[in-house]
Amino acid sequence: MATPPKLRALYRAFLRELPSRPLSEKSRSPLQARIRSTIASESKTPIEQAEQFLQYVKAQRMYATLLERYNPGMGMDEEERVRLTARRVGMDLPEEFSYAGSEESSGSGNKAE
C-alpha cells in the first residue's frame, strides 16, 4: 500500500494534467471527483497502475500540444488556409467580386414611362 504523501503527489500530478477550470461554486469536475474518490478509497488498484495511467495522460497532452504546434491550419476553414498559404509564398489573393452593386442598378433600370 502506498503512503499518503505518495498518493497526494499522484493526485496533484493528475490535477496538473487536467485542463484548468475557473473557480466557481462547483469547482471540481466529475473527473476530478472520480480521481479523488478512487485515490482516497484505498482500493486494491496498485500505485504502479495509477502512475502508468498518469504517464499516458501526460503523453496525450503532449501529443495534442505538438499536433496544434505543427499543424496550425488544422482548425481553419479551406478559404482561410488558402489565403494564408498564398501569403506564406509572398502572394495576396485577389479580392472577390461582389454582386451587391449590380443588384441595385438592375432594379432601378426599369424606367420605361
Image (tube, rainbow, N blue to C red):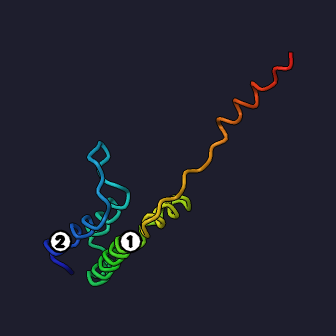
Total marks placed: 2
Residue occupying image coordinates x 32% and y 68%: 38
Assign the N terminus to one quadrant of the image: bottom left
Residue 109 located left or right of residue 11: right
Q: If you read the primary sequence from the N terminus, does the residue marked by circle 2 or circle 1 appear first?
A: 2
Residue occupying image coordinates x 71% and y 30%: 105
Assign the C terminus to one quadrant of the image: top right
Amino acid at circle 2? Ala
Q: Position of residue 29 (x, y in %)?
A: 35, 55
Tell me the quarter of the picture where residue 36 sits.
bottom left
Residue occupying image coordinates x 21% and y 66%: 12
Q: Are marks 2 and 1 in contact (CB under 8 Å)?
A: no
Q: Position of residue 6 (x, y in %)?
A: 16, 75
* Label ID, residue 9: 2
Q: Mark 1 = which residue?
A: 64
Binning the other alpha carbons within 10 Å of mark 1 as few (below 14), some (14 to 19) or many (20 upward) gives: few
Q: Please tell me which residue lies in front, 35 or 42.
A: 35
Asked if 26 appears above or below 71 in the picture, the reply is above
Q: Position of residue 99 (x, y in %)?
A: 67, 41
Q: Please tell me which residue lies in front, 49 or 71.
A: 71
Asked if 25 appears above or below 41 in the picture, the reply is above
Amino acid at circle 1? Ala
Question: Hey, which residue is sitting farthest left in the picture?
Answer: 5
Asked if 100 appears above or below 60 in the picture, the reply is above
Q: Secondary structure at mark 2?
A: helix
Q: Position of residue 18 (x, y in %)?
A: 31, 64
Tell me the quarter of the picture where residue 10 sits.
bottom left
Residue 1 located left or right of residue 69: left
Residue 96 located left or right of residue 60: right
Residue occupying image coordinates x 52% and y 58%: 93
Q: Please tell me which residue lies in front, 20 or 32.
A: 20
Mark pair 2, 1: CA separation = 24 Å
